[in-house]
Amino acid sequence: MPSDIAIKFCGLSRPSDVSAAVDAGARYVGFVFFGKSPRNVSLETARELALLVPPGVAKVALTVNADDGFLDDLTAAVPLDMLQLHGSETPERVAEVRARYGLPVMKAVGIREAADLDAIDIYAEVADQLLIDAKPPKGADLPGGNGAAFDWDLLKRRKYWTVPWMLAGGLTPENVAEATAWTGARQVDLSSGVESAPGVKDPALMQAFAEALRT
């Protein structure tokens, strides 16, 4: 029986990744546009991958503090369903991107302590969805995809916001059932948790992740 929890597999970089994500029942697939990431793809590669995604699966572009010039090129080259802003974009910038490109915008919000939850309410006013992720470790090169989790207790009494949200940060086939039960998340996002090496998706792990949610 399919899970009613939506999965987003992020950081896809090969046609086989797209096939594996779709076969595992993903409702979102993500492509990373951040040069320091081992999952970074070119616009040309992203377009080729996006054209392989069947209808009904949302194609999401993850960008980090991207300027209008890059976003203009991205949206012109790649058929997308959503933009994910994963940097230090302000609420004003989120609203600007949403208005300029006419696409739903997901804003990532990093969490380490209770005080970080305030940002969720602020960004919920301007974004279509939120991605609640672990703040990167100090000195990390990547804003996400570090395989780090945050204290899920922080969300236990704050499960509901005015827009849909995804849980991210350190999710694996072994812990996702506990994570969703504990936080009440109805959508989950992961990248490194289903990889055999940085940037290399493992179809067996993707299936195992989906199966963990079904059972």
Image (spheres, rainbow, N blue to C red):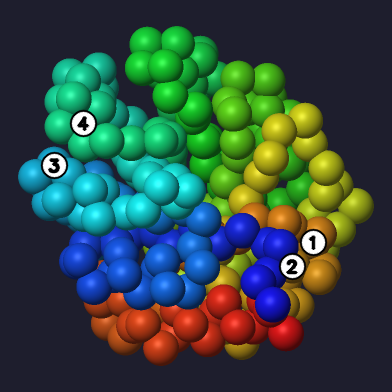
Q: Position of residue 74 (x, y in %)?
A: 21, 31
What's the mark number on residue 183?
1
Q: Amino acid at mark 4?
A: Leu
Whether residue 182 sits left or right of residue 55 in the image: it is: right
In the displayed structure, would residue 161 be above or below residue 92? Answer: below
Whether residue 126 sits left or right of residue 70 in the image: it is: right
Q: Amino acid at mark 1?
A: Thr
Q: Give the CA separation, mark 2 to mark 4.
A: 33 Å
Q: Which residue is mark 2?
A: 180
- Disc 3 crowd rating (10 Å Cα; few below 14, some 14-19, many 20+) is some
Q: Is residue 177 visible to us here?
A: yes
Q: Position of residue 31 (x, y in %)?
A: 30, 51
Q: Position of residue 215 (x, y in %)?
A: 72, 85
Q: Give the CA separation, mark 2 to mark 3.
A: 33 Å
- Disc 4 crowd rating (10 Å Cα; few below 14, some 14-19, many 20+) is many
Say which label, 2 or 3, has the lower sequence index. Answer: 3
Say which label, 2 or 4, has the lower sequence index. Answer: 4
Asked whether the residues under the numbered discs 3 and 4 touch, taking CB atoms below 8 Å apart as contact, a structural biologist would say yes
The picture quadrant where one finds residue 85 is: top left
Q: Which residue is mark 4?
A: 74
Q: Which residue is mark 3?
A: 43
Q: Secondary structure at mark 4?
A: helix
Residue in the image at 74% along x and 57% along y: 185
Q: Secondary structure at mark 3?
A: helix
The picture quadrant where one finds residue 119 is: top right
Say which label, 3 or 1, has the lower sequence index. Answer: 3
Q: Amino acid at mark 2?
A: Thr
Asked whether the residues under the numbered discs 1 and 2 touch, taking CB atoms below 8 Å apart as contact, a structural biologist would say yes
- Disc 1 crowd rating (10 Å Cα; few below 14, some 14-19, many 20+) is some
